[in-house]
Image: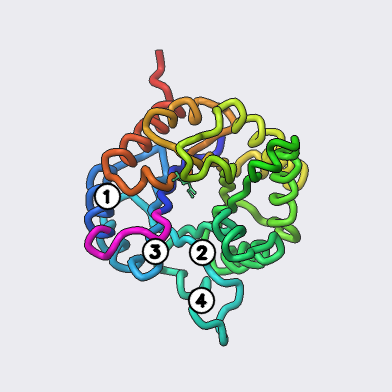
């Protein structure tokens, strides 16, 4: 059974003061959390300060993106080796990167390889658009994103995959847990098993898209969903802490 993972993607939000307050609030409340990996992904300039605020807490740190090259003339970009030692995780292939910044599966694949070679844990994001869903292509689109994103990658032990249907992101319109679970088991898990046999079953699969304290329990109750990638609700301490606690409760119900 893959580990339970809950990731907060702050996107391009917060100033330094807000980032520190948010990290301290979440870090304190989840200080001794066990049974779930909690990861905060602040904007690049705040990684170091947020890392400081999380010191002594079980909460981990992640970046929201990175470049695939190690160094060079890539103005404005951040390399894996710069993140190494600073954070543990990196979100790659987020739909906002794909849609707004033209990232292709091939670029994302290069980024994943660079992340792995520097000991970072990639969170590969996949998901279909509304058009693709309406034309019945959701599973094939997602399966293809997984296949291409992982092309020529042999070791996936530190990988997580997040299924974020584009139409559910920031819309308040989450997928139903059944729809998400179906795409995740037939579009993602099946491909991972086909490519990596048993190791494929150990990859944590996260759902993302309008996750909140009211719906996380139903998502996390699905066998093929092992956690969440949370946007808006990760910007509020109480909402995010509730999401983490509810995800954990759904994944490890008390013995009766
Ligand atoms: P929301 O939770 O705001 O819909 O964002 C989801 C997301 O894109 C997380 O990466």
Q: Which residue is mark 4?
A: 77
On the picture, is 30 further left or further right than 197?
left
Residue at x 57% of width, y 65% of height: 115
Residue under pointer 1: 27
Residue range in magenta is 10-18
Say left or right for 57 vs 72: left
What quarter of the picture does the N terminus occupy?
A: top right
> Residue 219: x, y in percent?
50, 30
| Colour pattern | rainbow
Q: Which residue is mark 2?
A: 65
Q: Is residue 21 visible?
A: yes
Q: CA distance from mark 1 to mark 4?
A: 28 Å
**Which label was assigned to residue 43?**
3
Q: Secondary structure at mark 3?
A: loop
| Disc 1 element | helix
Q: Is residue 244 above or below residue 116?
A: above
Q: Position of residue 20 (x, y in %)?
A: 24, 59
Inter-mark Cα distance, 3 to 4 = 13 Å
Residue in front for this viewpoint, 111 or 103: 103
- State whether residue 70 is above or below residue 56: below
Indicate which label's residue lies in the foreground, 1 or 2: 2
Q: Is residue 74 above or below residue 86?
A: below
Residue farthest toward the bottom in the current orientation of the protein: 73
Residue 62 point in image, percent of width and height: 43, 58
How far from the left and from the top, in percent, is residue 158? 56, 53
């Amino acid at each position: 059974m893959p580990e339970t993972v809950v990731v907060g993607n702050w996107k391009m939000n917060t100033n330094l003061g807000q980032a520190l307050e948010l990290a301290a609030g979440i870090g304190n409340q989840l200080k001794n959390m066990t049974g779930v990996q909690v990861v905060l992904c602040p904007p690049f300039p705040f990684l170091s300060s947020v890392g400081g605020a999380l010191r002594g807490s079980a909460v981990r740190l992640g970046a929201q993106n990175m470049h695939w090259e190690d160094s060079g003339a890539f103005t404005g970009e951040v390399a894996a080796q710069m993140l190494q030692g600073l954070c543990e995780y990196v979100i790659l292939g987020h739909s906002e990167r794909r849609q707004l910044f033209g990232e292709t599966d091939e670029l994302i694949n290069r980024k994943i390889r660079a992340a792995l070679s520097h000991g970072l844990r990639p969170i590969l994001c996949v998901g279909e658009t509304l058009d693709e869903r309406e034309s019945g292509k959701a599973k094939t689109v997602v399966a293809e994103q997984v296949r291409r994103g992982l092309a020529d990658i042999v070791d996936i032990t530190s990988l997580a995959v997040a299924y974020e249907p584009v139409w559910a992101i920031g819309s308040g319109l989450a997928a139903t847990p059944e729809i998400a679970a179906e795409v995740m088991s037939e579009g993602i898990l099946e491909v991972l098993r086909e490519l990596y046999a048993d190791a494929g079953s150990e990859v944590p699969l996260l759902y993302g898209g309008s996750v909140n304290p009211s719906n996380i329990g139903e998502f996390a109750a699905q066998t093929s969903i092992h956690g969440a990638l949370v946007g808006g609700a990760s910007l509020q301490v109480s909402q995010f802490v509730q999401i983490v606690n509810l995800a954990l409760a759904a994944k490890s119900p008390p013995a009766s």
